[in-house]
Amino acid sequence: MNPNSIGKDYLDHISIDCVIFGFHNKSLRVLLLKWKTINRWALPGGFIKKNEHADAAAQRVLSERTELSNIFLRQFHTFSDPDRNKADGNLDISLLPVRFSKEAIDWIKGRFVTIGYFALVDFNKVKPVPDLFSEECRWWELEQLPVLLYDHHHIVDAALIALRDALQYQPMGKYVMPKKFTLPELQKLYEVILGKKIDRRNFRKKILGLNIIHPLGETRKGGAHRSPDLYSFN
């Protein structure tokens, strides 16, 4: 992307921000970017090309940051607060080591309405890739997020609420769990997303009753206790 052609190639005043969720070591993770020369982190995002669907733009951003395709993606909210770019962690464009024209700077500094998406990915398959403005791209535990630019903390919070709602009627674990898993591992994912403990017997009864997973006739070897049965999503 030519930083000085963005005002010509992309839609004015509309952006996208993506909350990419992964599950690793019994914790929910979020993929973040560290902007160059400043100690600030942000969500992966970008702009929408003038001949591009917003969903296609989000898929493009996700593919560039994770090197994955066919990612589960859902648009969940539009953030239009006139002061959203003036929140804590505001970015001084002059600090970035990218040469912008005056026109490009004025374009970036303008008010942007952003479309929020959340994505679910297999943590172990992601290869985090920084973008043009970033020096690092890596996972953070949801409970230990750093200071984020603009209103990105608010976007993460809203994405988590949308994920919790979707969990009630769609098998979200399918997109973040490994191909083979145990019921305790799947239950932990649900507990982490919902932020509360779940009764083991009730969870087992309900999840098996939904007929969205099936036993593989295999067990997880090497544990200190009885080898648990392995399952897979239908």
Image (cartoon, helix red, strand yellow):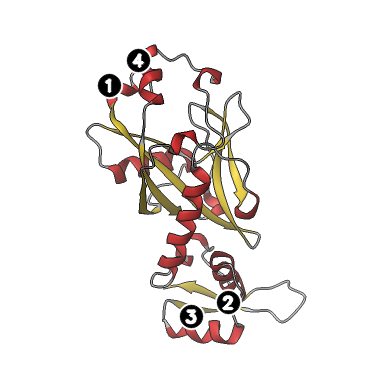
Q: Position of residue 47 (x, y in %)?
A: 35, 33
Q: Which is closer to the viewer, label 3 or label 4?
A: 4
Mark 4 or 1: in front is 4
Image coordinates of residue 71 in percent, x first then y, are: 40, 52
The alpha-carbon separation of the residues under discs 3 and 4 comes to 55 Å
Residue 74 against residue 81 in the figure, above or below:
below
Residue, disc 3: 207
Quadrant, the N terminus: top left
| Residue with the mark numbered 4 | 103
In which quadrant of the rendered image does the C terminus lie?
A: bottom left
Q: Going from the N terminus, do you reach mark 2 or mark 4 first?
A: 4
- The residue most toward the right is 224
The amino acid type, in three-letter code, at marker 3 is Ile
Q: Secondary structure at mark 3?
A: helix
Q: Are marks 2 and 3 in contact (CB under 8 Å)?
A: yes
Q: Position of residue 75 (x, y in %)?
A: 35, 52
